[in-house]
Amino acid sequence: MKQIEPYTNVDEAILSLDNGGRFYNLFSSADDGIITQSELSKVGGLFNNRQKTILFFEVAISNLDSAAKVEVLSKFDRSLESSYHKYKAQELLASEANGIGIVSSNAIITGIPKMIESKSDFKGYILIPMLAGKVTTFIPVPIIDRYDVYEIRDEKSSDTFLIAHAKGSEKLPERKIKVAGVLKELKSKKDEDKGSKKFLEVNYFLNLP
């Protein structure tokens, strides 16, 4: 999980993103007015993960106004534009996420997180892939064994939503923030066929004023 410092204006964003990519990206050039997947991946420090790259981009431009965002998007090449429309995040309040959030999709949620400290205060299971010979099986394990888990709430409702990030990462501040990640299923019981709840696996966060 990584804290993002968003761009403050459109010129800063375009200068950063139109960077030529890495040395082996022979078909990308800096300052040519076109932003490619390789250039965006370079800024995000990512490789071959289009979904996460688009998520990084959306957090990075989140402080720009609508006109500035449109101008940056107009610089995308056709392939990157296609990725953007495929992986564009849902922007949700904490009180909306469980109802209308789409599993396996990117999401950005605004709210105030509070960490769940005790295993006895929370029960929930995720499926972890385990390789046995050439066969992959999925084993249910308590989410709190693998993640730091939080309840996040927004200012319009007392409803909360679960978010989580890998243990060992920086703890989230208990203040209004945006968290960005991928929505995943959560099982209330080990033997559930399908998760009855959702949670957000957090990749990025952004402090708000």
Image (cartoon, helix red, strand yellow):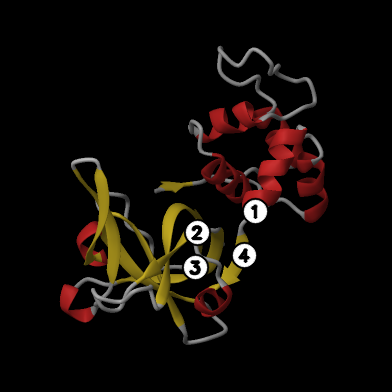
Kind of residue sitting beneath label 3: Lys
Q: Which residue type carries mark 4? A: Glu
In the rendered structure, the answer to whether residue 107 lies left or right of residue 84 reads: left
Residue to which mark 1 is pinned: 88
- Which of the two discs, 2 and 4, sits closer to the camera? 2
Q: Within the image, what quadrant is residue 119 found in?
A: bottom left
Q: How far apart are marks 2 and 4 (CA)?
A: 14 Å
Badge 4: how crowded within 10 Å, few (<14), some, or many (20+)?
A: some
Q: Is residue 175 visible?
A: yes
* Mark 2 secondary-structure assignment: loop
Q: Name the residue under label 4.
A: 91
In the rendered image, is residue 76 in sight?
no
Residue linked to disc 2: 104
Contact flag, marks 3 and 4 (Cβ < 8 Å):
no
Above or below, 182 relative to 25:
below
**Residue at the disc numbered 3:** 176
How many residues crowd around disc 1 within 10 Å: few (fewer than 14), some, or many (20 or more)?
A: some
